[in-house]
Image (cartoon, helix red, strand yellow):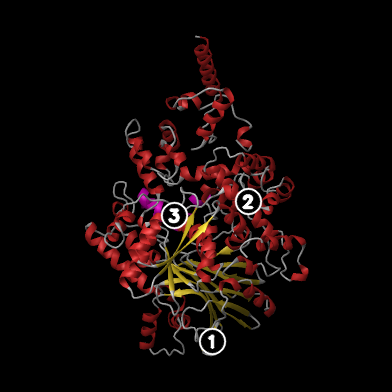
Amino acid sequence: MFGQASTDLRDDESLLDRGLIDSTGVLELVGFLERRYAISIDDRELVPDNLDSIARIVAFVEAKARAQVKDIAS
Amino acid sequence: MCGIAGTLSLSGHPVDPALVSRMGGALAHRGPDERGLHVDAEVGLAHTRLSIIDLVGGHQPMSLDAGRLWVTFNGEIFNYIELRDQLIGLGHRFTSRSDTEVILHLYDRYGPDCVTMMNGQWALAIWDSRRRRLFLSRDRMGVRPLFYAHLNGVKFSFASEVKALFQDADVPRALDLEALDQVFTFWSPLSPRTIFTGIHELSPGHSLIVEAGCVRTWCYWKPQYEPTKMGSSQTLSEELQALLVDATRIRLRADVPVGAYLSGGLDSSVTAALVKRFTTTPLRTFSVAFDDAELDESWYQRQMRDALLTDHESLRCSSSDIGRVFPDVIRHTETPVLRTAPAPLMLLSHLVSERGYKVVLTGEGADEVLGGYDIFKETKIRRFWAAQPQSLRRPLLLRRLYPYMPNMQAQPLPYLRAFFKVTERDLDDPFFSHLPRWELTSRLKCFYSDATRDRLGTYGAVDDLRSRLPAEYARWDTFSRAQYLEAAHLLPGYILSSQGDRMAMANAVEGRFPFLDHRVVEFSNALHPTMKMKVLTEKHLLKRAAQGLVPDVIVNREKQPYRAPDARSFLDSGQATPEYVEELLSEPRLRADGIFDPSAVQRLVAKIRGGRAIGVKDNMALVGILSTQLLIELFIRTSPDAHDSERGTAVRRGELFVRAGLN
């Protein structure tokens, strides 16, 4: 996200509709989330329902992190 | 062949011969063999010649009847032999064997309509001294370039390249921001506009007259898409092959040896095979190879070399070669580009020229004319899917698109669906085929500075194009509309110019394109779209015509567009960044030039340097921004006067870049 387009993005706005995610954008996004939050994302999880807004990403990453903590704990 | 330039005084002020000479001098690379001038009080014509036909008799500017008519001409009239015979039959007498003299006689007899009789690629100017009329014309498809500047009531100047017009201090030098916005949407300005304010091009298929101080342009030919041609694939492919054989045959008319480019794809393979099979011309072929396996097509090139037994030479091009010559590339494109693909072609024409060749045949135009591009396939799949939007199977066809792009192939299907999804609004849009591409390209506009955004205001490039569509467009089917958009805009605006004429003529090499013979174009435009793309097989009829002419591995291969390494040619962790890149993308320079937002550009540069998965958009953005910055450096910042003694430091820096380039 380079220019002004990113400055007024609402949490629930679609990244696809705003043109912020292009054909490599989703791969970049996944790479970033995996590195930053030490989670691993399965191919089947790569759907707009999980990743197509800030709010959805937050919810998705939180759920993944909780699941992984549970995995480690059990 | 050649470069042309000239100026007509509209003020009564006599023409300055030194200016006309400088204008010709700026085009010396296009015609290193000879330079000619004709200057009187009212008009000045310049010509730099690359001698190809009638080496002894074809000097220019050439006159008829001791100066009644004068012509300065760049290009070829391929049917000049037939036209000459006809004119001789009508009583015309010729003093040379050149096609240039044919133009003079043809104009003398038929006036401006004469160009409709010509089969060729031309940019020409005729000074009709009795009528005191200047006539300009450009070929149907826009193979040869022609620019002009009309300073109302003062003068009208024209030239093959903008740099010749800029020899005149009266011609303003400024970037046209709306034209830049068009580049950042369609890849090129919308003709007749150019990236420079006040400089226009004569559009393909147009002629122009300056008479009594008034300028009038008109269209003498335009593509029409009416599927009137019926017949089986077999009979139509035979007809196509016969046309291509003749289009190739007349393009071999030259008094110098003719070479051919072999990309490894179907189109250039067909062209080269036609030369080999249907003419006695000895064939020498040239191609580009890349280190990057994703871009390299050497294996296919070798298949063709072995099949045709040609004397073949390949130029290996690295990303650092591209970074090195890019300033010189932009000095020749004279417009921003979003891909580096022109660069290897400039290096290739250098090799061709070193080998003593002045003319090459290529397969250019086949994708536009006979339906080869993936965008046509994409359009068809999106239409098919939109007819049953709930279908789970139809969007699976999206996997058939862009097989050569690993990023695209790695996309999860839900995302592919999202990228190519069709809304009801899109279905009715006249730009159905091209909106996804233009929307992707338009994302580059997020790099504009606030000042650029303010100056552009509510300007919309897509709406601008919408208002210029020909009336017939609404009648055409989706496939034909997509073809028209490619043939009328991207082909002349980028492929034939930035990637074609300019890269070849930078080294005095002339390209000739059998697929752009207007008889081939008119034949194809009269075909039903299914003859071009049958289900999802592109160039169906051409593939049929090519059977037995080129090896099956070439006919049946997956289409791969010609591409070159983009961003990593400039910013690669493994190699030093060229000095000009550092400077032109530096914060102070970006701020001073004012077009782009420095911090956004810095983030892009950091991302590319970091090697983080960069896609089409990042590559286009870097090349677009860098080429725009180079254009400002080389054409706007330089002093308008070309006298060395009067040049500023900026000019010297510009020249340094160029020296650091090819030489």
Image location (x, y in percent) of residue B634: 67, 60
Q: Residue furthest top?
A: A74
Mark 3: amino acid: Glu
Image location (x, y in percent) of residue B29: 59, 71
**Taken as a whole, is the magenta stretch helix, strand or loop?**
helix
Which range is magenta?
Answer: B464-487
For residue B486, the mark is 3
Q: Is residue B77 magenta?
A: no
For residue B68, the mark is 1
Mark 2: amino acid: Leu
The answer to whether residue B365 is left or right of residue A32 is left
For residue B48, the mark is none
Residue drawn at (38%, 81%) of the image:
B81
Label 3: state its secondary structure: helix
Label 2: state its secondary structure: helix
Figure quadrant of the C terminus of chain B: bottom right
Chain letter of the residue carrying label 3: B
For residue B626, the mark is 2
- Compared with B322, B124 (above or below) is below
